[in-house]
C-alpha cells in the first residue's frame, strides 16, 4: 500500500532525511520512532505531498508522490499533532464540508458521510456549533472527521497525541485501531516508545535522517535481549557523539 523508495530531503544546510526506504501493508500500523529533529515530520510531509523530496520517491496506493500528487492526496488522511488547523469561525459541519470540497467529494455523498461520521464520533451535540466554542476533545473529533471524510485508504499521523491528556490520546489510539480494522495502511510517528510499542505492528527507528532499524516490536526485543522497548530505543538512538 505504501512504498517509500530512497527518499531524501536536503534543506539548505541540513540533510533532514537521508535515503529512507520502507513499506507498509494494508491493515498495518507502522511506527516511525525517533528523537526531536530525527526527520519524522519531514518524511511524513513528503509522503503527504506537502514537501518535495530532493531525491527518491514514494508510491501510495498506485500513485507516485512526484507524478500524481493529486491522486495521492485523494488516498490519504492526515492527522498532525499541535494545531488542528480548523477554522474557528466556522461550525464543525462547515469545517468538514470545506475540506471535503477540497477533495472533490460529491455534495450528496458528503451529506450522508457527515451524518455517518457524526454518529461514529458522537458529535451530535456540537456538529453545528462554531469550532471556537468547542473543547479540545471536541475539536479533536472534528479534526478526525475531517481527516477521513473522503474515506482514505492510507492514514498519516504525525505526533498526533502530543500534548493530549490520557483520554484524548486514547480517542486517537482507538481511532487508529479502527483504521487498521478497516484495512487502512497507517504510519504513526512518535517519540514515545511506550506508545509505539502499544499500538504499532512494526517500527522503524529513525536517527539523524536515517532508518537505523526496522522490525516488529517482538523482533526488537529478541534482537536486543531486553524486555522493554524503551531500553532498546535508548540504546539505538543513544551514543550520538
Ligand atoms: N523547513 C525547514 N527548513 C530547514 N530545516 C528544516 C526544515 N524542516 C525541518 N528542518 C530540519 O530537518 C531536521 C528534521 O526535522 P523534522 O521536523 O523532520 O524532525 P522530527 O523528527 O519531526 O522532530 P520532532 O520530533 O521535533 O518533531 C531538523 O534538523 C530540522 O531542523
Ligand atoms: Mg516532528
Image: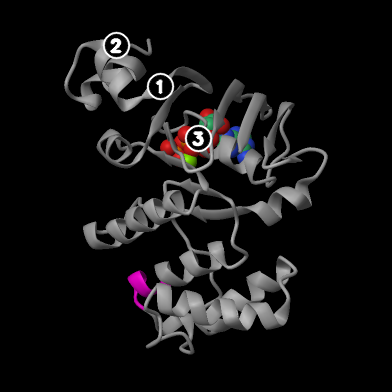
Q: Is residue 120 magenta?
A: no
Image position of 226 (left or right of 26): left
Furthest residue in direction left, as rendered: 227
Cβ–Cβ below 8 Å for labels 3 and 2?
Answer: no
Q: Work out which quarter of the rendered image holds the C terminus and state it.
A: top left
Counting residues from the start of the chain, the first of labels 3 and 2 encountered is 3
Q: Which of the pair 84/63 is nearer the observer?
A: 63
Q: CA gap, disc 2 to disc 1?
A: 10 Å
Badge 1: residue crowd in 10 Å (few <14, some 14–19, many ≥20): some
Residue wearing tag 3:
40
Residue 223's mark? 2
According to the picture, the residue beneath numbered tag 1 turns out to be 215
Rendered location of residue 211, percent (x, y): 49, 20
* Disc 3: CA contacts within 10 A as few (<14), some (14-19) or many (>=20): many
Callout 2 touching callout 1 (CB < 8 Å): yes
Q: Is residue 114 left or right of residue 124?
A: right
202 in relation to 184, above or below: above
Compared with 216, 213 (above or below) is above
Residue 232, image quadrant: top left
Q: Is mark 3 within 8 Å of ligand 1?
A: yes
Task: Kindly tell me whether residue 89 is visible in this rendering.
Answer: no
Sequence-first disc among 2 and 1? 1
Q: Image check: 100 left or right of 229?
A: right
Provide the residue span drawn in magenta.
135-139
Q: Where does the image place residue 63, in percent across and percent down from the top left?
A: 75, 42
| In front of the other: 239 or 20 | 20
**Most extreme residue toward the right, as rendered?**
67
Amino acid at each position: 500500500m505504501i512504498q517509500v523508495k530512497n527518499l531524501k530531503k536536503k534543506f539548505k544546510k541540513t540533510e533532514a532525511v537521508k535515503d529512507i526506504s520502507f513499506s507498509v501493508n494494508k491493515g498495518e500500523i507502522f511506527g516511525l520512532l525517533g528523537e526531536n529533529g530525527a526527520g519524522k515530520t519531514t518524511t511524513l510531509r513528503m509522503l503527504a505531498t506537502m514537501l518535495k523530496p530532493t531525491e527518491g520517491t514514494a508510491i501510495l496506493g498506485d500513485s507516485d508522490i512526484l507524478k500524481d500528487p493529486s491522486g495521492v492526496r485523494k488516498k490519504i488522511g492526515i492527522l498532525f499533532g499541535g494545531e488542528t488547523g480548523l477554522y474557528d469561525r466556522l461550525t464543525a459541519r462547515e469545517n468538514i464540508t470545506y475540506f471535503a470540497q477540497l477533495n472533490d467529494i460529491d455534495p450528496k455523498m458528503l451529506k450522508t458521510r457527515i451524518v455517518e461520521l457524526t454518529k461514529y464520533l458522537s458529535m451530535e451535540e456540537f456538529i453545528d456549533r462554531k469550532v471556537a466554542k468547542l473543547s479540545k476533545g471536541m475539536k479533536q473529533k472534528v479534526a478526525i472527521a475531517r481527516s477521513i471524510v473522503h474515506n482514505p485508504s492510507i492514514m498519516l499521523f504525525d505526533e498526533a497525541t502530543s500534548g493530549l491528556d490520557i483520554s484524548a490520546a486514547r480517542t486517537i489510539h482507538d481511532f487508529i485501531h479502527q483504521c487498521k480494522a478497516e484495512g487502512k495502511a497507517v504510519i504513526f510517528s512518535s517519540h514515545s516508545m511506550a506508545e509505539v510499542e502499544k499500538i504499532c505492528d512494526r517500527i522503524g527507528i529513525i536517527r539523524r535522517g536515517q532508518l537505523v532499524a526496522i522490525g516488529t516490536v517482538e523482533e526488537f526485543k529478541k534482537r536486543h535481549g531486553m524486555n522493554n522497548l524503551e531500553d532498546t530505543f535508548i540504546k539505538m538512538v543513544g551514543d550520538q557523539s
